[in-house]
Image (tube, rainbow, N blue to C red):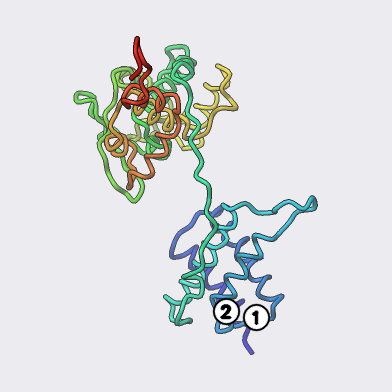
Amino acid sequence: MTDELAVQLAEHELWLTAERGLALNSRLAYRRDLSRYEKFLRVRGISQLSEIGEATVSAYVNYLRELRNDEGEPQLGAASIARGLVAVRSFHRFMVTEGVASKDPSEDVGAPRVPQGIPKALEEDEVLALLGAVVGEDARAQRDRAILEVLYATGIRISELVNIDLDAVDLHDSIVRVLGKGSKERLVPVGRAARAALEQYLGSGRLQQRTARPKIADSNAVFLNARGGRLTRQGVWKIVRFAGDRVGLGDRLSPHVLRHSCATHMLNHGADIRVVQELLGHASVSTTQVYTKVSPDRLRTVYEASHPRARRASGRAS
């Protein structure tokens, strides 16, 4: 009898590469998760898709929950278990799409709830220190200063920043056109400090970088590397991290730190959450709402100022 499971797992991996075009790291993650799933099925003598039902997938999720390390602690967290189920669902949905199976046995199996992490924003004075970490007026300093200012001013992702082209920047109206997730365009305003940094870099620093190696220069990219080509995400992250190390923020930084800080600080200063949602390019306001949990001090201040039974008595009981 043909080992249907092995054949279809190989077909699914090929689909992830050829059809979905997943990056290598993503494909490796799927491979690890599905290898664990295959081993689970093999131990139970399952090699045919028809032998896999909803109870089988539910048992697999329970198996992942019960895995323990040498110290008896859970081997996988909720996020890892949920990711494992995503891989299993991807495989079974692919089988249905290809007509190999008539039903997806993972469809109604629930994943463990993954606690929603709260973004770690910097304090405003810490952001000011970070923005002031770049010194000098050479081309590199102008570029790095503009990058930090734009990231904090707009809250855009690093991946969005590196893809900005010259024709997407309108300094007259202080607007940048950004291509976000799902190839959705949005217009993002740029504040005075970021605009000034961009003007200086585009008027001087970028030209120096582009003419240094004209044969490989990128004529469209706003932010260039030392060779005149488009700066990569990794390159931008190194710039942010280097600036952070100079002011003692190394351990506080993540690739999204300025995005988190932009959203948090705007909400702290009274910005409407729908405006911040549009600025960040979130499809749902629920994604933006996580930033409202960052500042309990502001929550208490607004509550005490607004709720009639929370105000302190002044001279007489309220």
Query: Is residue 45 left or right of 125 when viewed as pictured?
Result: right
| Dot 1 amino acid type | Ile
Residue 132 vs residue 235, the one in the foreground: 132
At which x and y percent is residue 58? 58, 70
Residue 12 vs residue 257, the one in the foreground: 257
Residue at (53, 47) in percent of width and height = 115
Query: Is residue 20 left or right of 245 when viewed as pictured?
Result: left
- Mark 1 neighbour density, 10 Å: few (under 14) some (14–19) many (20 or more): some
- SS class, disc 1: loop
Q: Which numbered marker is on residue 46?
A: 1
Q: Quadrant of residue 26?
A: bottom right
- The first of marks 2 and 1 along the sequence is 1
The residues bearing labels 2 and 1 have C-alpha atoms spaced at a distance of: 8 Å
- Mark 2 neighbour density, 10 Å: few (under 14) some (14–19) many (20 or more): some
- According to the picture, the residue beneath numbered tag 2 turns out to be 52
Name, please, the residue furthest toward the bottom: 1
| Dot 2 amino acid type | Ile
Give yes or no for contact between labels 2 and 1 (Cβ–Cβ under 8 Å): yes
Which quadrant would the C terminus be assigned to in this image? top left
Residue 209, visible in the rendered structure: no
Name, please, the residue furthest toward the top: 315
